[in-house]
Image: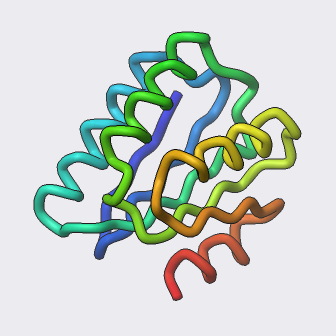
Amino acid sequence: MINVTNTDKLVTVYVLGEFTLTDFKQFEEAVEYAIKFQGRVNLLLDLSEMTGYTIDVAWEEIKFSRAHKTDFEKVAVITSDQWTIWSAWITKLLVDAEILVFDEREPASDWVMA
């Protein structure tokens, strides 16, 4: 399950359980809408309750990152999962944005909104 909100050049995504392709498409639509009307945006990805993701999501993430290389200013990822942390650093190679990984929501939110 996914919850996406869009406010003032910030797209906030909260994933609970498994991150599916349907969830990713919802995320993608929200981000593309924000980019269209607000320009470069920041992302706050709360993956602290994510239990995993399907392989098709991994592929879509790569394609999405390449297509939106310059559309993000900051990306804050909240997770303690080592695989997700590694994935965030790989994504850093594909996009021109500051990407930081956090263990807790408050410092992530503070950083991405600064």
- Give the tally of numbered discs: 0
Give the residue at the far bottom of this rendering.
114
Work out whether residue 97 or residue 24 is closer to the camera in this orientation and state it: 97
Query: Residue at the location (67% across, 46% down)?
Result: 88
Q: Residue at x 77, y 63 (%)?
A: 102
- Give residue 25's position: percent from left, percent from top: 34, 26
**Who's the residue at 82% across and 33% down the image?**
83
With respect to residue 20, does 110 lie above or below? below
As displayed, is residue 77 above or below residue 94? below
Q: Answer with left or right where residue 37 lies relative to residue 40.
A: left
Residue 20 versus residue 26 in the image, above or below: above
Image quadrant of residue 105? bottom right
In this view, the residue farthest toward the top is 55
Give the x, y percent position of residue 14. 55, 46
Q: Is residue 93 left or right of residue 48?
A: left
Residue at coordinates 43% horizontally, 70% vertically from top-left? 73
**Extreme residue toward the left, this view:** 37
44 displayed left or right of 29: right
Does 31 appear above or below 7? above
**Residue 35 figure quarter:** bottom left
Q: How is the image coloured?
A: rainbow
Residue 53 rendering spot, x and y as whole percentages: 64, 20
